[in-house]
Image (cartoon, rainbow, N blue to C red):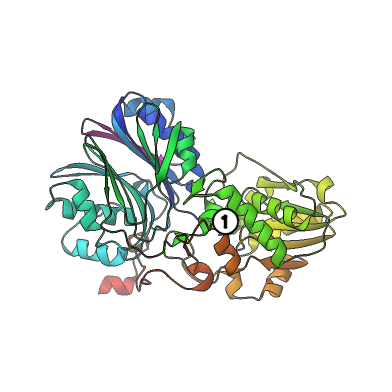
Amino acid sequence: MPKIKEECGVFGIYGSKNPRIAQTVYFGLFSLQHRGQESCGIAVNNDGVFKSYKDLGLVNDVFTPNVIEKLGEGNIAVGHVRYGTTGGNERSNAQPIVVNHIKGSMALAHNGNITNSYELRSQFEAKGSIFQTTSDTEVISYAIIEERLNSDTIEEAVCKAMNKIKGAYSMIIMSPQKLIAARDKNGFRPLCYGKTSKGEYIIASESCALDSVGAEFIRDIEKGEILVFGKEGIKSIKEHCNKGKQTSCVFEYVYFARPDSIIEGKNVHEARIKAGEILAKEHPVKADVVVGVPDSGLDAALGYSKASKIPYGIGFIKNKYIGRTFIYPEVKSRMDKVKIKLNPIANVVRGKRVILIDDSIVRGTTSERIVKLLRDAGATEVHMRVSAPPFINPCYYGTDIDSKENLIACKYTIDEIAKKIGADSLGYLSLEGVKKIGYVDEKSGFCTACFDGIYPTEIPTKTDKNRFERKINHIDEEK
């Protein structure tokens, strides 16, 4: 895992009957592809009859024109792109999850990670519930359906279920007549909505998805808010909203989100520029050129160049036809993908002292390879600067850092890390600095637990949610 894994992107649409509704969702998911490259899915609602399709792979590969056509017309739809942090890379774990129950059908798409998933799943299994997946999204669906049996409306059921589920979730729920957006009370993961000129309402993980379908951004959905789209219009339920500070994942600004997105009132591109400017002030060094690692390191490199007055250069060409290197788990495969993903421009770095900007160092394998690429291209010095603090703690809210075991910053000092990756020097953005990059006003607040160990919620004591993906232990079998 040379890069951080993100988990998902969600997209929903509510409007009048549309024969091309699946195509609209396709465009929305395509713009959210950076948030998940494992699998994707779309569910379409045609007067209460759900049609869905999901599979492993990229949006463009899974949703061929024939598949899109078969999904048919509808007035409500929901889509999802996935990179799983809970549950393996199996087709059954692809989303949206579609469930048929006594009061109708429900489709659910979820971004985040439920911290009490193990406990909830155990409770449901003890009651006889049968799970078809190993993802925590199915746990959420059971929580909602259980409450739906004793509730007058789907939104009432969602509100009650939110009393049970803990952790990070930005989710979209489709019922036979309504589309619902809900966000956890901390607001860990982004979620916003807008409206098209045709009067369709669009919900998406990032504002860039609204742009892709011609929707005008209205606002971010508030932390703890439930937003209901139905025949009566839009209804906002704020029973779970609290006055405490929001704790959005700051790494959305550093890495996850697309630069053209606006999250909580802050443009991601501008946030990364600011990260680079702060880096230049915190870790200055004499050099000839500043280069960034595509894609999320480029904006920070521009900021570093601007603040330091050192020229900015395009140091690498990225092969746009290969996905993020972290989607390949085997070390050799990862290294091969780095080779064909990035190629240095020798004329930019040859004979020069280079400042290399990247968004993070997790295990160090990719950083080591990139530094070597610059050395081989003729760079006389390579000074690495990182637009985030060192990762020293696991994340329980949807970023796939589940332990300290493989975090390089937990094993070595900064000077030792620099030596291991082959850099002449290494500097990380400070904790104070990273909090500034997404700041808009006094309401701005961020989760920085992976950097400082201060968790906004209770830390789960049990996280073993994938037991059905392990081979049988003979000792356990005898029991």
Which type of secondary structure does the marked residue at label 1 adopt?
helix
Residue ID for mark 1: 254
Given residues 241 and 426, the one toward you in this image is 241
The relative height of residue 75 versus residue 289 in the rendered view (above or below) is: above
What residue appears at the point 46 percent right and 47 percent down from the top-left corner? 38
Q: Which amino acid does label 1 sit on?
A: Val
What residue appears at the point 68 percent right and 70 percent down from the top-left corner? 417
Spot occupied by residue 420 in the image (x, y as percentages of width and height): 70, 69
Residue 335 in sight here: no
Q: What secondary structure prevails in the magenta region? A: strand
Spot occupied by residue 189 in the image (x, y as percentages of width and height): 42, 54
* Residue 283 colored in magenta in the image: no
* Residue 58 colored in magenta in the image: yes
**Magenta residues?**
40-59
Q: How crowded is mark 1: few (under 14 residues within 10 Å), some or many (20 or more)?
A: many
Spot occupied by residue 111 in the image (x, y as percentages of width and height): 39, 52
Q: Is residue 442 left or right of residue 365?
A: left
Q: In this view, does 60 lie to the left or right of 431?
A: left
Given residues 282 and 119, the one toward you in this image is 282
Q: In this view, does 383 lie to the left or right of 388?
A: right
